[in-house]
Amino acid sequence: MAMKTYRQAINEAIVGEMRRDADVILMGEDVAGGAGGSGEDDAWGGPLGVTKGLLSEFGPGRVLDTPISEAGFIGAAIGAAASGLRPVVDLMFNDFVGVCFDQVVNQAAKYRYMFGGQDQIPLTIRTMIGAGLSISSQHSQSLYPVFSYFAGLKVLVPSSPYDAKGLLTSAIRDNDPVIFCEHKLLYDMTEDVPDEGYAIPLGEASLLREGGDVTVVALSRMVHVASDAAAILAREGIETDLLDPRTTTPLDTESILESVEATGRLVIVDESGPRCGMASDIAALVAEEGFGDLRAPIVKVTPPHVPIPAAPNLEALYVPDVNRVLDAVRRVVAY
Amino acid sequence: MTSPLLLPLTMPKWGMSMTSGKVIEWIAAEGDHLQKGDEVVEIETEKSLNVLEANCEGLLVRRVAAEGDELPVGALLGVLAAPGSPTDPETIDTFVAEFNASFVPETVEGEDTVTGPRRLTVDGISIAHRYHPGSGPPGASPVVLLHGFGGDQEGWQFNIGDMAMDRPVRTLDLPGHGLSARVVGDGSIGYLTGVVSDWLDEVEPGPVHLVGHSLGAALAVELASRREFLSLTLIAGLGPGTAVDEEYVEGFITAERRRQLRPYLLRLFADPRLVTRDMVEAVLRAKRIESTPEALRRIATASILGVDTDPVERLHSLTTPVQVIWGGRDDIAPSSQVDGIPPSVRVELIAEAGHMVHVEAASKVNRLVRGMAAGHP
């Protein structure tokens, strides 16, 4: 066991699965980085260095740099998966899914169902989500609710290095297409991560804090915002059940409903938008199946329904922060 | 320390990975008269925010640490004066200066990380273990603690401190458990005992007191027939062949999720409040490590469920002084098994505790182990 970053944890999961299963291949824009050019062969390992070292261990036959065409290489990865490989493909920013939307939602997601289970798409799409780097509207969105809309896709939103390694391991071993959403502000977060391989089952929320006064459900980086808020609330005597669903499909509805049954209060903290987002989805779930347990209206803490600003001061206003979570929790507790 | 009546209030160690903590807010003011259990100062660790309570009665005469300070475990936070102690500033200044002059932050020797246990390769497999030198007299014979099935050495966290007041304490993670390798041979008591015995040859070849919980008790009895021990304390187990609830063992091995595992952990304790989120998460994380369920199953089959010997008979043949401690509300290994054990064996039934007696009734168990060790130097 050692302290590892989110970036290292992701790298370890890919290396572990590539060693374990010769059918696992890696492809995407610059996943090797610099291959075929002049200078050293193993250059960057992706724009943020996540796949560093893979080219030298597994060679260009299993670590493939692709042209800048999501429609092309995502389609190729789906085809490779349909014909027996287990590709891990890097869709650099999730915002670019528009370019290959048909491949992902009409082909990958529906393939197994439409062919009556005769074939499957064991594909993992790694992709970056999240605001915070001031890289503007088309590079900062959190589109996991969009992916979660489509039956046939599994969607993972790891919030920590430990979860990232265990969930990516499960993703690669899964026989269905999985969208693995990496929050770009988490790459340098560190925690104890086992050196050995391990898999976290999909569809199990992580309970980060056991309280009893209020249920806070948070996803991806918002887990840390909610966790900071919960520590402050504990000093005010408000004890939080903090749940991180970790996977939005499958969604651990039982853990959420069970917690709300005990607390009667729900706050959802989500970086995806306020309309048709995960916060709305979870609010609807509880309104439908846990209404009798509620002692206060559900409160959603999300960004506003606007494009994400590039200006740092405006972007900071856009993303939910600790104070907004504190206000929301105090409001439902005082109700 | 110049005055036995001035007491240091130090940075606590909450959990195995804690090496430092941040002083968030003083709750008690200088001049406050504190009772044992009163809240003194709020400390934030990497993982939690907690309040340090006074561990004895006294007057808070000095707040040494400032709010916002990040300090190593054991560092001086403040000074308490017991009733009758001098409280003049010079005496306290001297106390603080002397404490700080002699304070050395906890570090681990060798190549290991600061937070983790040490590692040793025994019989070709990596074993995680710890040594707590304690504050006993020089030359005091050590006590060695063997944890139970599915547990690890961190399970002794409520016992080590007390026991180390008299003598050094050694713990390890058994093969297939904790941070040790998931290599368990044929999973038999013979194999596990061999590893523990070879570990003892390496780290503690001299005479020691042995304490085992549950599966650890089975290993302790087997070890006692292979080498000399000063005393044996068997907790919630009598030795190889102790009756254990089969459904529990199977459920513990197969549970993959929090909601599946929790009911089994609840069965270990009489008091359900002891099954915390952190405990469930720690067990899940250990069980998720690849090949753990396979290793546990092999041990369960060969060492727990498939042993066809009478543990009571075995106790008759032991020459080592033995005591047995059992929880009256043990739902895993029924306490009725102590009926018929030889009168030379001291039996302590702790009525209100479950299978994890050493956690639920830690101070009683600690007192019994210390007494046993003191009686057989």
Image: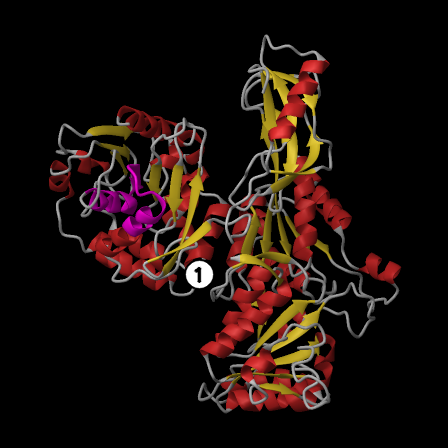
Q: Which chain carries label 1?
A: B
Q: Residue B40, located in which quarter of the rendered image? A: top right
Q: Foreground residue, B199 or B296?
A: B199
Q: Residue A137, located in which quarter of the rendered image? A: bottom right
Q: Residue at x 70, y 69 (%)?
A: A129
| Image: A255 above or below A264 | below
Q: Where is residue A287 in the image (x, y as percent from the top left)?
A: 62, 56
User: Where's the C terminus of chain B, which quadrant?
Assistant: top left
Q: Foreground residue, B179 or B263?
A: B179
| Image: A33 above or below B215 | below
Question: In the rendered structure, does residue A131 fall within the stretch colored magenta?
Answer: no
Q: Foreground residue, A203 or B330?
A: B330
Question: In the rendered structure, does residue B217 fall within the stretch colored magenta?
Answer: yes
| Image: A258 above or below A142 | above
Q: Position of residue B344 (x, y in %)?
A: 15, 28
Residue A269 in sight in this render: no
Q: Mark 1 points at which residue?
A: B288
- SS for tag 1? helix
Q: Which residue is drawn at 47% across and 48% down?
A: B117
The amino acid marked with disc number 1 is Arg
- Residue range in magenta is B196-224
Q: Which residue is drawn at 30% across and 50% down?
A: B196
